[in-house]
Image (spheres, grey):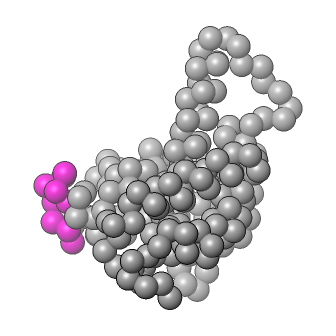
Amino acid sequence: MFDTTLDTTEIWHRFSNLVYAFVLKRVQNPDDARDIQQDIFLKIHTSIPQLKDKAKLEAWIFQIARHRITDYYRSQKKNYDLKEAQGAYQHSTQEPIADKQELFCCLHPFIQELPERYRKVLEMQALEGLSTEEIATKLSLSVSGVKSRLQRGREMMKTKFVSCCHYEVAENGKLKGEQDCPRCNH
């Protein structure tokens, strides 16, 4: 394990290949994956003093990675929406991956379909990266109330992924399988 100073060079040596593979699997463009990897490690370098529990370093790194990937797809979506609005977007047989999938193909549509009380907390946590305590403060709820809503919202999302995208729920309660989604043809 690392010493208490958590040297970012040491973190780079230990996690850079894992992070790159994680990003590349979700972005599928090596150049974009390298750019995102660099953004992730810049964020790690500037935010490492904020990491409270050093035992959770790896989980924290991959949380940053998921947020950066989401940001990437958001920016791609904005770029595509702008092109469509200007009439310059040419629909081709080789659609950009951002048009087909964002981590999970139906993630954002499913979140939007949730009742507001569950949708709001999921968006704040998954898309904005807020902690349960921050969400509780912003929404004037108890931390346990936020946790309950997050858990119920995740269960609703899981049900949607199973019924629409043909995922299965593993023994550990997590989704498994490959996307076979009639909704987005992915």
Asked whether residue 143 is drawn in magenta, I would say yes
Q: How many labels does the image show?
A: 0
The rendered magenta stretch, by its main secondary structure, is classed as: helix
**Which percent across, then down, holds residue 68?**
53, 51
x, y percent for residue 32: 69, 45
Residue 59 as seen in the image, left or right of residue 35: left
Which is more toward the observer, 46 or 92?
A: 46
Q: Where residue 24 sits: x, y (%)? A: 72, 57
Q: Could you tell whether 37 is left or right of 124 in the image?
A: right
Q: Does the magenta stretch include residue 115?
A: no
Q: Is residue 160 above or below residue 59?
A: above
Residue, far right: 93
User: In this view of the protein, which residue sits in the foreground, 70 or 61?
Assistant: 61
Direction from residue 184 to residue 67 in the image, left or right: left
Q: Which residue is at 70% across, 13% downward? A: 88
Left or right for 96, reference 141: right
Kindly indicate the quadrant of the structure image that contains residue 156: bottom left
Q: Is residue 4 above or below residue 153?
A: below
In the image, is residue 41 above or below residue 147? above
State the residue at coordinates (61%, 35%): 76
Q: Is residue 128 above or below residue 20?
A: above
Q: What stretch is highlighted in magenta?
A: 136-144
Q: Residue at position x 55%, y 35% from top? A: 75
Q: Which residue is drawn at 71% across and 19% down?
A: 89
Q: In which quarter of the image is residue 72?
A: top right
Let me know if residue 70 appears in the view: yes
Q: Can residue 149 be seen in this view?
A: no
Q: Return the x and y of residue 119 as percentages of the image width and height.
A: 37, 51
